[in-house]
Amino acid sequence: MDVGFLGLGIMGKAMSMNLLKNGFKVTVWNRTLSKCNELVAHGASVGQTPAEVVKKCKITIAILSDPAAALSVVFDKDGVLEEICSSKGYIDMSTVDPETSCKISEAITSKGGHFLEAPVSGSKQPAETGQLVILAAGEKALYEEAVPVFDVLGKKSFFLGQIGNGAKMKLVVNMIMGSMMNAFSEGLVLAERSGLNPHNLLDVLDLGGIANPMFRGKGPAMLQDNYSPAFPLKHQQKDVRLALALGDENAVSMPVAAAANEAFKKARNMGLGDLDFSAVVETVKVLKHSS
Ligand SMILES: NC(=O)C1=CN([C@@H]2O[C@H](COP(=O)(O)OP(=O)(O)OC[C@H]3O[C@@H](n4cnc5c(N)ncnc54)[C@H](OP(=O)(O)O)[C@@H]3O)[C@@H](O)[C@H]2O)C=CC1
Ligand SMILES: O=CCCC(=O)O
């Protein structure tokens, strides 16, 4: 199957590489076109614009930074809308809000095209190893057609019904994750500053009821101030911000998520936005120093 791929950031590069390794013919595009070179070395073709990719491929996938980027590749000049038609499907795997997804869906389907939103749970390493969790919603027939692609990219796909449900599920999950990361950060700094060995804390956590892959995976690197980005902090803050908006719409009180959002905003102000979201621990260290 010819698959188009728009966006070769941390996730898109790993996912499109995975499709190539598994025998798909892949045509890639990235706003910074030079990022396509590594994929070409592994057998990908390049489209000069999103429209050119859609023209060539039956199914085109996108995974882009945020709502503005997701809208731009669809609606701008040389965008997806220029070539979408009834024989083509478009799958947006970016993490966006339900409103953005609905806007894209309406535009694609009004031209006869087929649309799925399919944000993913899992980060750089699961993307590299095809272990993502895919949260799809929209047109069921396109979902079924895309199952061979999802089977390569992920360990499990969910079809969640109408457009917006995939985005909502993803935002709820990432809101929980962002809050957990802040609690974890405070715990690590508190352990160290109160005289405990934080490595012992990691061992204790890992043997108890709140053991989880995030603490296990990120903890040792955080203790070495290593924030090499798997999930950039600026994207995590975007997700908590969008989840808070969902909370506003549904009158759900979320003080813990609101506090997490403030910490991620502070981290962005400290210039940490491009680092891994675990760098939020630096905000706890700063507060301690200034007291
Ligand atoms: N990293 C992770 O662990 C995960 C990320 N996600 C979500 O996936 C999406 C991508 O994440 P990730 O790969 O980490 O992000 P990166 O920041 O690594 O990559 C972002 C991509 O979006 C492109 N882009 C940004 N702005 C525009 C624009 N205005 N027009 C066209 N392209 C644009 C970038 O192009 P350029 O190279 O030119 O800058 C790049 O290809 C985000 O929505 C994120 O929340 C979901 C699950 C996990
Ligand atoms: O959106 C990013 C999710 C990162 C993860 O699930 O580890």
Image (spheres, rainbow, N blue to C red):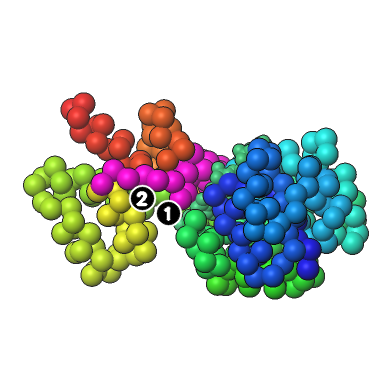
Looking at the image, residue 256 sits to the left or right of residue 95; the answer is left
Q: Based on the picture, tell me whether residue 139 belongs to the magenta stretch.
A: no
Tell me if mark 1 has few (under 14), some (14-19) or many (20+) residues whose alpha carbon lies within 10 angstroms of its own.
some
Name the secondary structure under disc 1: helix
Taking the image as shown, residue 167 lies to the left or right of residue 3, namely: left
The residue indicated by pointer 2 is 181
* Disc 1 + disc 2, Cβ < 8 Å: yes
The percent coordinates of residue 258 (x first, y second) are 42, 41
> Is residue 76 or residue 31 the one in the foreground?
31
**Of residues 145 and 99, the one drawn nearer to the viewer in this rendering:** 145
Q: Which residues are magenta?
A: 224-247
Residue type at tag 2: Met
The N terminus, quarter of image: bottom right
Residue matched to label 1:
177
Q: Residue at x 58, y 47 (%)?
A: 9
Relative height, residue 193 to residue 158 (above, below):
above
Q: Amino acid at mark 1?
A: Met
Q: Is mark 1 within 8 Å of ligand 2?
A: yes
Please determine whether, in this image, residue 161 is positioned above or below residue 11.
Answer: below
Q: What residue is rendered at 83% in x and 47% in y?
A: 52
